[in-house]
Image (cartoon, rainbow, N blue to C red):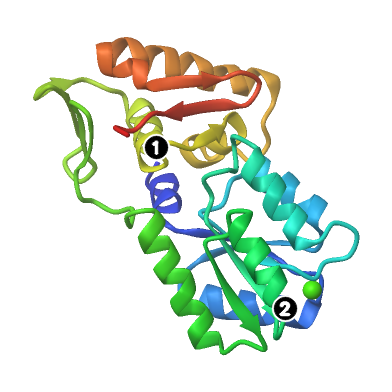
């Protein structure tokens, strides 16, 4: 359980780049700064990975074979599971049109190649800071629901709710990603620590979510089911 909590607290970045040298360079700098890194060599691979295990940020090269980065960006934004994931684009110098299109399609920022690793890391940090508060031990509040990760206390309207460790970790994952759909596979991986999602294991998630909803009463209605995909906790907006 300690390990799974630690993994939830680490930002995961998905790198989408077909050129091995640039990919290696990106992996090196991201890992050195403490990020967990996933890699995709093609747009199709990126979409697959983002769906099954949504990262905290996508670093997306626009020049990709077959499906280009703009199309990947558009599809990520159309899919309810991935639409909230911040995207930083890598564009070639002079590709003003691509840059504008990328931002119009929902990218959060861009970095022009050849990039300075220092500038790139600063952009990644800034986008993550802007789009998601740093996960940590500060109490999280949504409506009348409050979670204190350090003290392991959950309250609804200031009344403590008794949760199992799994229910607590599940709720924390949902609250930390509020507004975004988390797939059953993602929850199994991050809350249970399973890498492969079998049919029977997916039901485990459903059962825990049902119990969590019951225990949270009215605030439990914030946890919505996204049919065929997973669950999403609605924020205050
Ligand atoms: Ca490329």
Which residue matches tag 1?
A: 178
**224 or 39: nearer the viewer:** 224
Q: Position of residue 11 (x, y in %)?
A: 46, 59
Q: Residue 171 placed where, x, y %?
A: 36, 30
Q: Is residue 202 above or below residue 50?
A: above
Quadrant containing ligand 1:
bottom right
**SS class, disc 1:** loop
Mark 2 is surrounded, within 10 Å at the Cα level, by few (under 14), some (14 to 19) or many (20 or more) other residues, namely few
Would residue 72 appear left or right of 201 to someone viewing this image? right
Q: Residue furthest right?
A: 66
Q: Looking at the figure, which quarter contains the N terminus?
A: top left
CA distance for labels 1 and 2 = 34 Å
Residue at image coords 80%, 71%: 63
Q: Position of residue 135 (x, y in %)?
A: 33, 53
Indicate the position of residue 27 as horizontal and vertical percent values: 63, 74
Q: Closer to the camera, 4 or 231?
A: 231
- For marks 1 and 2, give the one nearer the viewer: 2
162 relative to 91, above or below: above
| Residue at image location 63% in from the left, 67% down from the top | 100
Q: Residue at x 73, y 59 (%)?
A: 70
- Quarter of the image for the C terminus: give it: top left
- Residue 214 occupies which quadrant of the picture? top left
Q: Is residue 204 visible?
A: yes
> Which residue sits at x=59%, y=34%?
80
Residue 187 appears left or right of 9: right
Task: Using the rendered view, name the quadrant where residue 31 is placed.
Answer: bottom right
* Residue 57 sits in quarter: bottom right
Q: Is residue 58 above or below residue 125?
A: above
The residue carrying mark 2 is 95
């Amino acid at each position: 359980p300690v390990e799974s909590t630690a993994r939830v607290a680490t930002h995961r970045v998905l790198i989408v780049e077909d050129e091995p040298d640039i990919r290696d360079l990106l992996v090196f700098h991201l890992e050195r700064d403490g990020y967990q890194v996933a890699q995709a060599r093609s747009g199709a691979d990126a979409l697959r990975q983002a769906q099954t295990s949504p990262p905290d940020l996508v670093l997306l090269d626009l020049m990709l074979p077959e499906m280009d980065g703009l199309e990947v960006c558009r599809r990520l934004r159309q899919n309810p599971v991935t639409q909230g994931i911040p995207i930083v684009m890598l564009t070639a110098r002079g590709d003003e049109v691509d840059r504008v299109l990328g931002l119009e399609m929902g990218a959060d920022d861009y970095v022009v190649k050849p990039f300075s690793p220092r500038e790139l890391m600063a952009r990644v940090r800034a986008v993550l800071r802007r789009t998601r508060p740093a996960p940590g031990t500060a109490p999280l509040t949504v409506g009348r629901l409050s979670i204190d990760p350090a003290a392991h206390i959950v309250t609804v309207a200031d009344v403590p709710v008794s949760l199992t460790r799994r229910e607590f970790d599940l709720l924390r994952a949902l609250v930390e990603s509020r507004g975004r759909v988390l797939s059953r596979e993602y929850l199994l991986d991050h809350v249970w620590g399973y890498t492969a999602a079998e049919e029977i294991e997916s039901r485990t998630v459903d059962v825990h979510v049902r119990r969590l909803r019951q225990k949270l009463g009215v605030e439990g209605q914030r946890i919505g089911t996204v049919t065929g995909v997973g669950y999403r906790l609605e924020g205050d907006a």
